[in-house]
């Protein structure tokens, strides 16, 4: 039986506390700042912090330029002393999430601002998982591989992910199903027994030079500052190849989408973990609805913090209606769980 597992941000959050879309970049300082030394006059030494978070400071300046409501944030950061920078409540609306900011910046075709924000996405995610910030052990993905994927004949399992973090990549080698112009020498990317792992939004360890479009594969242990040293044509620093929603899908991604559709077409069972088909992911909704076989068994693993059975029933019904609308051609009942990724792995029965 071919089984496809589909991951979204909720899965990485459950496994290792990865920031969700709304927290990405904004909570970088809160997640990663070390305790500061206080001198004999009671003044915090922010020198190291200023260097580490210089790009974050620039980010706040960029935000001020694009959103009048954000004016004053870079000064607040500059004068933080020993305090941790917290985003003010009035900037918590959806329009200030990184996806939305990137969309706006793209419309205004501000290339330097776009580059800076991508750099910060990389910094936030890579810094958070480097010692000493690593708080959670990423156990769920490890258990998922041991208990779920490796319990099957490998050729029958494949993974599609909307996450560009490297949490699953750390656990074992996969076949990314994409051609690299220069693979990392220590990485065996192609082998018949590797599990297909299709990352539809790109990956932090795929580096691209936007001038010559060469794509390189790096180790998944790369850390912040890595890409500044990866210079390609005319001293252009490579960028992590991450495609956020709204961005035009580069030609390189088209092949990945068709490979994902191919896997979905072959699937007898598809399990969706921590992904909710948000409205802006129209491309995903279209692809799944063309590719899913009408007899496919569809399982949705979500997480509901409430224990009230009325609330849970309503939530289950809401999910059912949403999936019925998205994929009206599917014949079988959907299997919906609100007990999250951990429970799914724990109770997985191989069929
Ligand atoms: Zn180049």
Image (spheres, grey):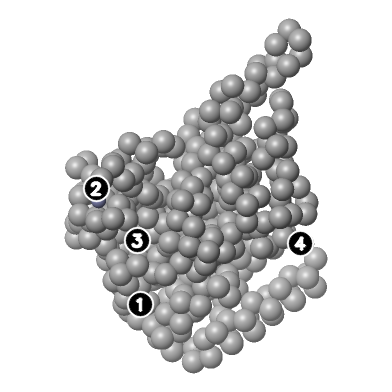
Q: CA distance from mark 2 to mark 3?
A: 30 Å
Frontmost residue, 21 versus 351: 21
Q: CA distance from mark 1 to mark 4?
A: 35 Å
- Mark seen at residue 197: 3
Q: Earlier in the sequence, mark 1 or mark 4?
A: 1
Callout 2 secondary element: helix
Contact flag, marks 2 and 3 (Cβ < 8 Å): no
- Mark seen at residue 233: 2
| Above or below, 154 relative to 113 | below
Question: Can residue 251 be seen in this snapshot?
Answer: yes
Callout 1 secondary element: helix
Q: CA distance from mark 1 to mark 2?
A: 34 Å
Contact flag, marks 4 and 3 (Cβ < 8 Å): no
Q: Earlier in the sequence, mark 3 or mark 1?
A: 3
Q: Nearer the viewer, mark 1 or mark 2?
A: 2
Residue where numbered disc 4 is placed = 306
- Mark seen at residue 261: 1
């Amino acid at each position: 039986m071919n089984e496809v597992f589909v991951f979204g941000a909720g899965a990485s959050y459950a496994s290792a506390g990865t920031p969700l879309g709304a927290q990405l970049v904004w909570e970088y300082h809160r997640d990663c700042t070390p305790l500061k030394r206080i001198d004999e006059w009671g003044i915090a030494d922010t020198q190291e912090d200023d260097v580490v978070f210089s790009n974050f400071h620039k980010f706040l300046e960029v935000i001020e330029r694009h959103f009048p409501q954000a004016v004053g944030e870079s000064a607040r950061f500059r004068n933080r002393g020993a305090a941790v920078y917290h985003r003010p409540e009035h900037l918590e609306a959806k329009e200030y999430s990184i996806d939305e900011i990137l969309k706006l910046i793209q419309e205004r075709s501000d290339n330097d601002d776009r580059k800076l924000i991508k750099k910060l996405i990389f910094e936030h995610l890579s810094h958070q998982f480097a010692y000493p910030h690593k708080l959670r052990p990423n156990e769920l993905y490890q258990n998922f591989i041991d208990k779920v994927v490796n319990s099957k004949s490998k050729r029958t399992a494949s993974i599609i992910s909307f996450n560009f973090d490297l949490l699953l990549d750390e656990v074992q080698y996969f076949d990314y199903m994409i051609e690299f112009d220069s693979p990392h020498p220590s990485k065996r990317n192609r082998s018949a027994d590797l599990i297909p792992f299709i990352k539809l939004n790109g990956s932090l360890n795929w580096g691209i030079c936007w001038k010559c479009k060469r794509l390189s594969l790096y180790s998944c242990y790369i850390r912040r500052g890595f890409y500044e040293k990866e210079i390609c044509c005319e001293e252009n620093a490579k960028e992590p190849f991450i495609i956020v929603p709204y961005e035009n899908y580069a030609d390189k991604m088209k092949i990945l989408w068709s490979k994902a559709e191919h896997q979905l077409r072959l699937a007898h069972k598809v399990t969706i973990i921590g992904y909710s088909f948000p409205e802006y992911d129209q491309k995903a909704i279209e692809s799944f609805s063309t590719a899913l076989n009408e007899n496919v068994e569809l399982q949705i693993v979500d997480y509901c913090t409430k224990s009230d059975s009325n609330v849970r029933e309503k939530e289950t019904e809401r999910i059912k209606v949403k999936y019925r609308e998205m994929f009206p051609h599917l014949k079988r009942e959907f299997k919906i769980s609100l007990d999250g990724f951990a429970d799914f792995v724990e109770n997985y029965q191989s069929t």
